[in-house]
Amino acid sequence: MNKEINFETYLIISYEKFEIFLLDIKNHKDIYQEELKFRDVSEKLDFNLLNEFLENNIFKIEKLAGNFINNINIVIENKSILTSNISIKKKNYTGEITYVLLESMLTDVKDLFKENYNQYKLIHMIIDKYIIDGISYSSLQDQISNNEVCLEIKLISISNIIILEIENILKKYQIQVNNFLDKGYVKDFSLIKQLDISQMAHNLKNGMNKNEIQISSKFSKKLGFFEKFFQLFS
């Protein structure tokens, strides 16, 4: 495993502070952490301050990691984040929950989102409930005969404008964004597991929440049926 894969960088953007972490994936611990606290009354992101924060920390992280930072994960709290809920129902003529059926339902939701919210980027897609023949389940049930399937889905997205402004700052350092994650979503899991936000963000983007569709994750291992389902939009 090379150094670039051994480490991941996380930038946390919120109303009160910026934080940056270098996460040692193998040992699952932060080997670098720095923060800049401020008071943001307007809840408007100060890009000049963010640029200054990055300038003060990027070189230090690269020196510690022994490699250039080419990619970064952004965990963000911002008023442009939009949370919406949608339900989709389909008749199931095969009597079994198949990959084709679930793919069709989730693709319909994704396409509907794009059609109605084209100024936003979808960053989280979470199945809250599976309703099979009127019975509600919190997780996917295998080997259940059914005639009708309903999914209740939570969509979390962020404005394309904010994404572009952040990406433009990072381009100065030749850094691309791997993932955008909603800080509120990550923080909820961090409190339960008592992990640093960088560690929990790593876990979530790698499939810890079994009901989240991994929109941009990259896996090289051979996947089973349900793993393929949850990596649907890779």
Image (cartoon, rainbow, N blue to C red):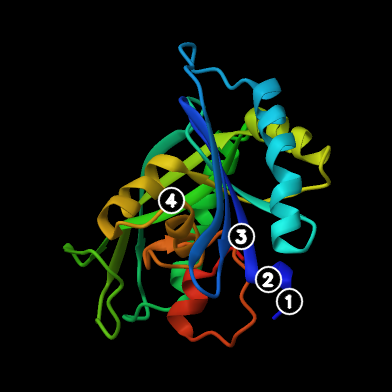
Q: Amino acid at mark 4?
A: Ile
- Alpha carbon of mark 1 to alpha carbon of mark 4: how far? 24 Å
Foreground disc of the pair 2, 3 = 2
Q: Residues within 10 Å of mark 1 (few under 14, many from 20)?
A: few
- Which residue is the site of mark 1? 2
In this rendering, position of residue 155 left or right of residue 123: left
Q: Marks 1 and 4: CB-CB under 8 Å?
A: no
- Which residue is the site of mark 3? 216
Query: Which quadrant of the figure contains the C terminus?
Result: bottom right
Secondary structure beneath label 1:
loop
Secondary structure beneath label 2:
helix
Q: Residues within 10 Å of mark 4 (few under 14, many from 20)?
A: many
Q: Mark 3 or mark 1, which has the lower sequence index?
A: 1
- Alpha carbon of mark 3 to alpha carbon of mark 1: how far? 22 Å
Q: Amino acid at mark 3?
A: Ser
- Alpha carbon of mark 1 to alpha carbon of mark 2: how far? 6 Å
Foreground disc of the pair 3, 1 = 1
Residue appearing at x 53%, y 70% in the figure: 231
Q: Amino acid at mark 2?
A: Ile
Q: Residues within 10 Å of mark 2 (few under 14, many from 20)?
A: few
Q: Classify 61 as above or below 80.
A: below
Q: Amino acid at mark 1?
A: Asn
Secondary structure beneath label 3:
loop
- Which residue is the site of mark 2? 5
Depth check, front residue: 194 or 43: 194
x then y, percent, for residue 100: 50, 74
Q: Marks 1 and 2: CB-CB under 8 Å?
A: yes
- Residue 197, which numbered label? 4
- Residue 184 falls in which quadrant of the image? top left
x then y, percent, for residue 85: 36, 42
